[in-house]
Amino acid sequence: MAFWQLTRLRVVYPVLLFFLLFVDGSLMAGMGGIFTAFPWHILPALTLVWLFYAVQFEVDKDIPFWLYVILIGILFDMYYTGIFGTYTLAFISAVAVMKQLHKILDERLLSGISIFLVGLIVYLIVTYVSGFIIGIANVSLVTFLAFEVLPTAILNIVLVTICYYPTWSLVQFLK
């Protein structure tokens, strides 16, 4: 791999990751009425989607990936929650599970969707358990699974599916 290609990947990936951090919040701010219409609570997780693409398309081997995961978790905590550690732990846990599943499954779309779905569920459960421990999550587990995990999974799987091949093309161009 040529130096300029490696540099291109090392610049574009974190810039898009940082950008998607704010797109997540902008989507919730702009479409909050739709995403939080009673009884549903849908959470766009574009930051996690971008981290998934790094695992799925093996970008993580060419960049300081774990540093980006930790930094994005810290920024997510600082910017959105003000409670340090919740999303940092959620991002680390989800990415670790996705990396382990990627060793077993291949790079086809259906395998990728399965990897992302498991990672998303881990991400949501870690945030739920953290909120429950802190005392800010006051819904039952069944309600959480039915009215947050299910609609969140549907939205994000649709996004992953639509953007899968364009992102693969972008990564191939950057590598």
Image (tube, grey):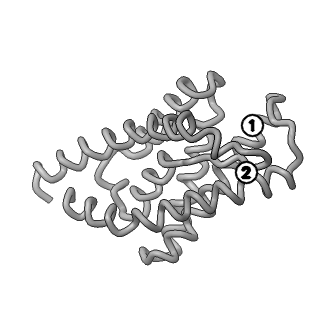
Q: How many marks?
A: 2
Amino acid type at image mark 2: Glu
Element carrying mark 2: helix
> On the image, which quarter does residue 114 sit in?
bottom right
Callout in the foreground (2, 1): 2
Front residue of this view, candidates 32 and 127: 32
Q: Position of residue 18 (x, y in %)?
A: 38, 36
Question: Where the C terminus falls, by quadrant?
Answer: bottom left
- Element marked by disc 1: helix
The amino acid marked with disc number 1 is: Ser
The residue under label 1 is: 130
Q: Is the N terminus in the top left, top right, bottom left or bottom right quadrant? A: bottom left
Q: Residue at x 52, y 30 (%)?
A: 74
Q: Quadrant of residue 149?
A: bottom right
The crowd level at tag 1 (other Cα within 10 Å; few <14, some 14-19, many 20+) is: some
CA neighbours of label 2 inside 10 A, class few (<14), some (14 to 19), many (20+): some
Are dots 2 and 1 in contact, CB under 8 Å?
no
* Residue position marked by numbered label 2 in the rendering: 148
Q: Residue at x 39, y 42 (%)?
A: 17
Residue in the image at 79% along x and 57% along y:
146
| Left or right: where 117 falls relative to 19 | right
User: Residue 77 in the image: x percent, y percent?
Assistant: 58, 29
Q: Earlier in the sequence, mark 2 or mark 1?
A: 1
Residue at image coords 59%, 58%: 119
Left or right: residue 146 versus residue 151 is: right
Q: Which mark is on residue 52?
A: none
What's the distance in space between the residues labelled 2 and 1, CA to CA?
Answer: 15 Å
Position in image of residue 90 (x %, y %): 62, 43
Q: Where does the image place residue 58, in percent across and percent down from the top left? A: 36, 62
